[in-house]
């Protein structure tokens, strides 16, 4: 086997801000990339890989991205739209590899195409929820040193009030006449070459929810994106090209980004993007589009179960729940309503997507469990000295895998979160003798989950 030369790992970024502000040395997480499906070439552009990469089916005429507003893009059409956006970014907006591009919009085909275009052009996507106000956007822009912004026309007021992104274009998320971006795309070529990025080049800055403190900027690379695509959906979801994905989380969240864009494109499936996330809209769209895979949270599944409307949910094959604890009663009612058992998942923005999961059929024999580590990940439950605790005892959850926590320019929190290569999720859990994990609570603020000298020993392999 040939050993990659140093040139193979050379960054394509000419704007090196993100790479210059990543954790270094002992603050980096250890990455486990030993499984064959988690071995990647040194040069990798995940946006190209998702649409046209090696092993992809000849799928130009297959449906890729759909919406209730009449958009029905095939893979060929999506690739053409992405190419035109790339040309606008690089020719009209002056984007160079490594620049940070803030995206602001509801879940629409255009937002999906823009995400792929920024990454294809070597940029770093900065994801923001449509609900963020000007003050929050200002903090995001300043932290990530955003250089460009692409914003849905109807959400422009808060971004304009923030007033920090120097180069901005607006776009229309739904059907209708084009805004600035669409007009600029009109005469652009429908093909483009991807930037020859290193696998380790950053391509995404995702901010945490801020539930346990100020939102923190987490950085993920092209390799991380592909590792996520080859973990949970491959081994737990078992998605295929015949699936049609649908769901409610925002593409600004890593849960929604994976479940509604990255995972379906990776296997050549189609995805339905809903610009509203109400349970009723979701249930109607499942019937309208004959969706087979759904990503949402316990509250929306419970709301659909409580709605007496006779929705046709028979097309659903797998349904994933994450974001909060999944009550056993919600499992039972969903199974009764649809015939499907919910897949539960524990993940984090720091780890990119789901790292601990359980297929629905296992839930009945292990009530209350959140599952086992997704293949490729290891977990350890440790006390505050870093030693593994006995089965049944609550401790801090530490994780290693093909992805890991990298905060942008934040060594203080990086030092608290990554210890001896392990990422501490901030969750307190316990395990049974079969290796199933059970969620207990969040680790209290200020609690030290492991000493500086402690190393989780005794881990559970996924």
Image (cartoon, helix red, strand yellow):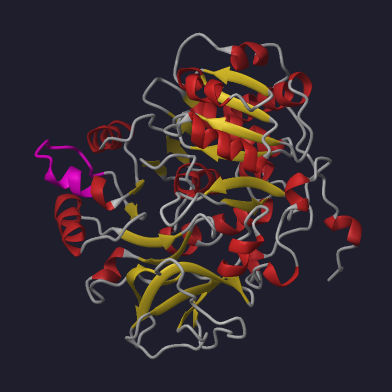
| Relative vertical location of residue 39 with respect to residue 126 in this rendering, above or below | below
Q: Compare residues 333 and 252 and report the one nearer the observer.
A: 252
Give the magenta range: 301-314
Q: Quadrant of residue 284?
A: top left
Would residue 93 be counted in the magenta stretch? no
Q: Residue 188, position in %: x, y?
A: 72, 16
The reply to whether residue 420 is visible in this rendering is yes
Q: Position of residue 236 (x, y in %)?
A: 43, 63
Residue 60, visible in the rendered structure: no
Residue 429 position, x and y percent, is 37, 75
x, y percent for residue 277: 32, 35
Residue found at x 44% / y 19%: 174
In the shown orientation, is residue 243 left or right of residue 418?
left
Q: Is residue 80 above or below residue 242?
A: above
From this viewpoint, which residue is outermost toward the top? 177
Taking the view exactly as shown, the residue that stands out farthest to the left is 308
Residue at horizontal 78 percent and vertical 46 percent from the top: 197
How many numbered marks appear? 0
Q: Residue furthest bottom?
A: 390
């Amino acid at each position: 086997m040939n050993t990659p030369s140093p040139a193979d790992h050379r960054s394509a970024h000419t704007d090196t801000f993100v790479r210059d502000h990543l954790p270094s040395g002992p603050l980096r997480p250890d990455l486990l990339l030993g499984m064959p499906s988690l071995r990647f070439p040194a040069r990798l552009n995940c946006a190209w890989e998702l649409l046209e990469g090696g092993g992809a089916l000849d799928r130009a005429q297959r449906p890729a991205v759909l919406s209730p507003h009449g958009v029905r893009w095939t893979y060929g059409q999506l690739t053409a739209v992405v190419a035109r956006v790339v040309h606008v970014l690089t020719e009209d907006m002056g984007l160079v590899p490594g620049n940070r591009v803030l995206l602001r919009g509801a879940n629409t085909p255009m937002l999906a195409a823009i995400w792929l275009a920024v990454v294809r052009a070597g940029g770093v996507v900065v994801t923001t929820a449509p609900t963020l106000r000007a003050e929050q956007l200002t903090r995001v822009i300043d932290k990530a040193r955003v250089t460009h912004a692409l914003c849905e026309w109807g959400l422009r007021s808060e971004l304009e009030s923030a007033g920090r992104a120097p180069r901005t274009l607006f776009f229309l998320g739904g059907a209708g006449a084009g805004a600035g971006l669409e007009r600029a795309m009109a005469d652009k070529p429908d093909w483009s070459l991807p930037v020859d990025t290193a696998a380790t080049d950053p391509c995404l800055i995702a901010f945490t929810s801020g539930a346990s403190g100020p939102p923190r900027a987490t950085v993920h690379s092209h390799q991380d994106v592909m590792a996520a695509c080859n973990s949970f959906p491959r081994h737990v979801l078992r998605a295929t090209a015949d699936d049609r994905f649908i769901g409610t989380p925002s593409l600004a969240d890593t849960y929604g980004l994976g479940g509604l864009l990255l995972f379906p494109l990776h296997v050549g499936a189609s995805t339905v993007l809903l610009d509203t996330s109400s349970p009723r809209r979701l249930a109607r769209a499942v019937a309208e589009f004959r969706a087979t895979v759904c990503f949402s949270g316990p509250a929306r599944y419970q709301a659909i179960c409580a709605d007496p409307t006779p929705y046709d949910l028979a097309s659903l094959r797998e349904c994933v729940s994450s974001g909060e604890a999944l009550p056993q009663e919600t499992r039972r009612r969903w199974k009764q309503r649809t015939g499907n058992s919910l897949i539960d998942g524990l993940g984090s923005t720091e780890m990119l997507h789901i790292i601990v999961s359980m297929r629905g059929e296992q839930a009945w024999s292990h009530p209350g469990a959140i599952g086992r580590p997704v293949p490729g990940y290891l977990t350890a439950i440790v006390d505050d000295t870093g030693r593994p605790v006995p089965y049944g005892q609550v401790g801090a959850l530490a994780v290693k895998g093909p992805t890991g926590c990298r905060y942008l320019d934040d060594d203080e929190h990086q030092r608290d979160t990554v210890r001896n290569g392990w990422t501490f999720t901030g969750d307190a859990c316990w395990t049974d003798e079969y290796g199933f994990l059970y969620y207990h609570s969040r680790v209290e603020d200020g609690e030290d989950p492991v000493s500086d000298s402690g190393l989780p020993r005794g881990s559970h392999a996924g």
